[in-house]
Each structure stands twice: as structure tokens, then as C-alpha cells.
Amino acid sequence: MDRFKIQAVIGTALTLAVMIGCGSSGTSPGRAATLVFGRGGDANGLDPALEDDGESMKVCDNIYDTLVAWSDSTTDIVPALAKSWRASEDGTVWTFRLRSGVKFHDGTRLDADAVVFTFARQYDANHPAHDIEGHFKYWTSLAMDDLVDSVAAIDDSTVIFHLSKPYAPFLGTLAMNFCAIASPTAVTKWGDDFFKHPVGTGPFMFSKWVKDQFVALECNDDYWGEPPTVERLVFRSIPDNTARLIAFTSGAIDGMDNPIPDHIAQVKGNPKYRVLTQPGMNVGYLAMNTRKSPFDDPRVRVAVNHAVDKASLVATLYNGLAIEAKNPLPPTLWGYADDVTPYLFDPNRAKKLLAEAGYSAGFDTELWTPPVPRPYMPQPHKVAVAIQANLADVGIRARIVSMDWGVFLDKTQKGEHPMSLLGWIGDNGDPDNFVTVLLSHGDKTPSQNIAFYVNKEVDQLLADAARIVDQKSRAELYRRAQQIIHSDAPWVPLVHTEQVVLFRRGVEGFHLHPTGRKRFESVRITESPS
């Protein structure tokens, strides 16, 4: 982005800051007026049952609650809208007792029927809110239709789930965004437009959304938990990394995520700013669409793995804030297959494999690239350019293709790409959330498995792992699945990154979380920007 465009972006950010209301003098005693958080892209929608991208969920995290949740800094399960629960001996019947006195932002009472509504609209084809534009993507990706037989209200405060089989990650799954409880009154009122008029029970209430500029939320003073300490929470969309940093250092925004490594170095050590880091539960990868030639040939896929110089990527574009990946699981997660031998950077080996597959002269293809910075890929276009050069060195002529974020996700999940860069941030601290979501059910469309990889042995290993309670036995099955996936090479696993968030001095109480979620009810502003 050139200097004049950056100035225009910053001018817009400062103007919006004035419009929205920045500062430390709140409308309630002891409460700061506004916290503005800068991010690299806008939300696609604010209906957690429909969306599957991090920018949408970043906002939804603060509007909605789930039955169970994670603790502030771990993936340990704690009560949320459900105050208690129990499972049957065989693990197929789960009973949840709800908190009393909780209301949705529109005044609707939270009861068992409201909880049933949230889930039934995702699995019951006859439910009045089921036939909605878009797909219940997470529900489909996790094959929840094969798991959940029914969800029923026993009385006003008791909900019972009947599962078709034991499912070890069930509680962690219920803590995920797609299981957030939405107001049935609002869903019914707005229909297909509910994604623009979200209503949950969370610490903040929806106020305004100006597409590609900002989403504004207001404090929920009637929150069942501890109410937020800021009156307003604003998510500003600033896709350009440099413009976002300038907005931060100029005081137009109070915090930001996904800074590039060079920008972190600029603010680190400056007492005016706080740099929060934590090993990320994530993976950035290059997926090859195994439905399309020539990527239906494993020799071509292994050749691409040998062609990509991951060490150079980490050194030049991540500046020590990432490690090379060899598996879909990050090494911080149990079940990681440390005994997998990574494909070495070896262009000559890549050329030999391409020749064996009948492509001695190489081939033309496309490399689809996210248009917005992500925690696993803060500079996606630069990553694409580097990989494009690697591929060219072995005869693969890849044209870089980018498009609007929402369109990009929709088209890749439908399999319209030949190759694509993407990544994943773990939702619940369970290997199932990586391997099963991203590398099974490849015969379904749309799919989070954008390699459309199908291996029946892998699918069976993952299904078996999800039914077993013993973690040691589950871990062994996930390790075996990763070994097979490595051999089949549907991806080039690229990196696992540190997650990084910047705040100005005086913004305190934010907790980095392994899942990458961003909840702001505990954030407080102790001093104004200087």
C-alpha cells in the first residue's frame, strides 16, 4: 500500500474513532468509554452457526455464550450457560442443567427450549429455521448429523443430548462457536438476515456494523457473569499490515492482532506498548486439491512438498515467530506424531518425481491465497510469492489468485481451487478438531477438508479415536493417522506460529488463549493514550 493510501486509511480510522467515541471517560462511573481493536479483515457474518472464519468468530465470541466454556487461559472445561452436567455410563446421553435468570439481549428468557432451538435448526431439516441461506459448515465438517440423534428439553432448565455413539471430544465441541446459543426470537424475526442482527447472552450486545470498516458492540449491563469494564467494544478492519500498525502507534486503535514480525520488533521494548505472545495452537498449510489433476497423483503432491523451502519461509517471513511444520497437528498438542520424518527441501528430488508422473516439462496451475492476514500467515501474499518461486524452480508455473475473504472461503470449501494456502486455529484442544475437521470427510461438499483428501483407513482411525475415552489410546490412533497422511501428502504443512497481540499501555486484563479466541469482558483501561 502506498503512502497516500496509508494516510487515507489512518484518516478514516481517526475519524471513525471520533464518531464511535474513544477515550477513558465512560458513560457509567468507573467504566472506560470505548476500546478499539484493529484486525486484518472484516467478519463474514455474525451467526455463529453459519460462520467458520476467525474474523467472524472474533466478534461472536463477545456476543454469545455456550453451554460450557474454556477457562481464561487453558482448554479446561468450565460451566457457562450450563451450571452442571452429567454423562451416562456409556457416554451417549448427556444432561445439562441451565443457569436461572439469564436473558438474551432482546429480553428473551434463556430456557431449555431456546437451547434446543439452537441445535435443532442445525440438524433438523423440518425445523422452521433450518432452511436458511448458507450452510451450517461446522456442523457438517464435524459430521455432527452422524453423532447427534436428538436434543430435547426435559423441563425449563434441563436439556438432554442423545448421541448415536460415545464421543470423547463432546464437551470441548460444545464450547466451540457453532454451539453458541442464539435467541430463538431474533432468529425467527430476522430469518436469513439474522447474521446481520446477532442476539446472544454474551457480555456485549450488537450495536452497529459498517461493512469493511467496523463492528461496534455495547456493554451488556445485565450479563449473568461479571459485566465488562468498557462501555463499547469496536472491531476495526484494517487489512494492510503497515496501516494497522500506524493506526495503533498513532492512537487510533487501542490494540491489534496479526502484526508482522518486523512490526513487532518496532514496538517491542517501548514502554508505551505491550506485546503479548503465546505458542499458537495452529497450522498454516498449502493444500492440493486431490480431486483435480495433476494433484490426484501422490507423486506430484510429494514433489510439491520437496519443492517448498519451509526453512527460508520461517527465516525471512516469520522472523523466529514460527517453526516448520511436518504434521497437521501442532507439536504442543497431545497425539502429535513426532516420529514422522519431514520431506526435505530437495528441488532435484521434486523434478525427478514430476518426471516419473509424466510432468518432466512441469505444468501450469493456480495458487489461491487468502486476502487478509491470519495468525498462521500474517503476510499471505509474500508467502505465496515465495512458494511460487520455489515451484517455478521445479517447473510448476503457479499463478497467484486472491479474492474477497468470504468468497475465497466459499470457493475453496466447494473445491474450485487447484492449490490453496490456508490454515487452522485449534478450537478445543483436541486432535480431533485438527485431523478430523481438516483431513476427513473429503467426499463431502462444502468441506473444511479443502484438499478433499479421502483415505478410508484414516477415516476409520479417526472415528475410532473419537469413541475412546482413554487419552493414551486415542493419541496412538492419531499418530498412526498422521503417518498415513504424511505418506499420502495432501498438504504441504508449512508452519506453526506464535500468536501475538499488541496493546497500548493502560489496556490491561486481556488473556491470550490457546484457541486464539478473543474475549474482552475482563479488559480494563487504566489510563488514556498519551
Image (cartoon, rainbow, N blue to C red):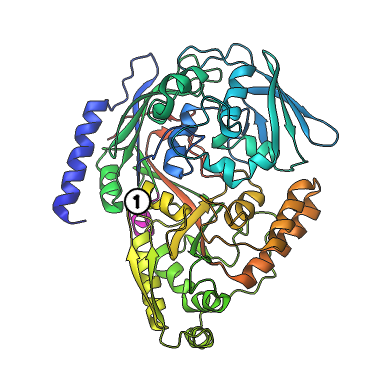
Instruction: Kindly identify the amino acid type of the residue bearing the numbered disc 1.
Output: Val
Q: Residue at x 39, y 28 (%)?
A: 193
Q: Residue at x 30, y 38 (%)?
A: 253
7 or 178: nearer the eye? Answer: 178
Label 1's element? Answer: helix
Q: What x and y, as percent, mark residue 417?
A: 42, 61
Q: What x and y, as percent, mark residue 167?
A: 74, 42
Could you tell me which quadrant the N terminus lies in?
bottom left
Q: What x and y, as percent, mark residue 241?
A: 31, 52
391 or 500: nearer the eye? Answer: 391
Q: Could one spot residue 256 in this view of the protein?
A: yes
The reply to whether the magenta stretch includes residue 386 is no
Q: What residue does disc 1 label?
A: 267
Relative height, residue 105 to residue 371 (above, below): above
Magenta residues span 258-268
Q: Main secondary structure of the magenta part?
A: helix
Residue 361, located in which quarter of the rendered image?
A: bottom left
322 or 51: nearer the eye? Answer: 51
Q: Residue at x 17, y 40 (%)?
A: 11
Classify mark 1: residues with Cα within 10 Å, few (<14), some (14-19) or many (20+). Answer: some
| 492 with respect to 402 (left or right) | right
Q: Could one spot residue 228 in this view of the protein?
A: no
13 or 172: nearer the eye? Answer: 172
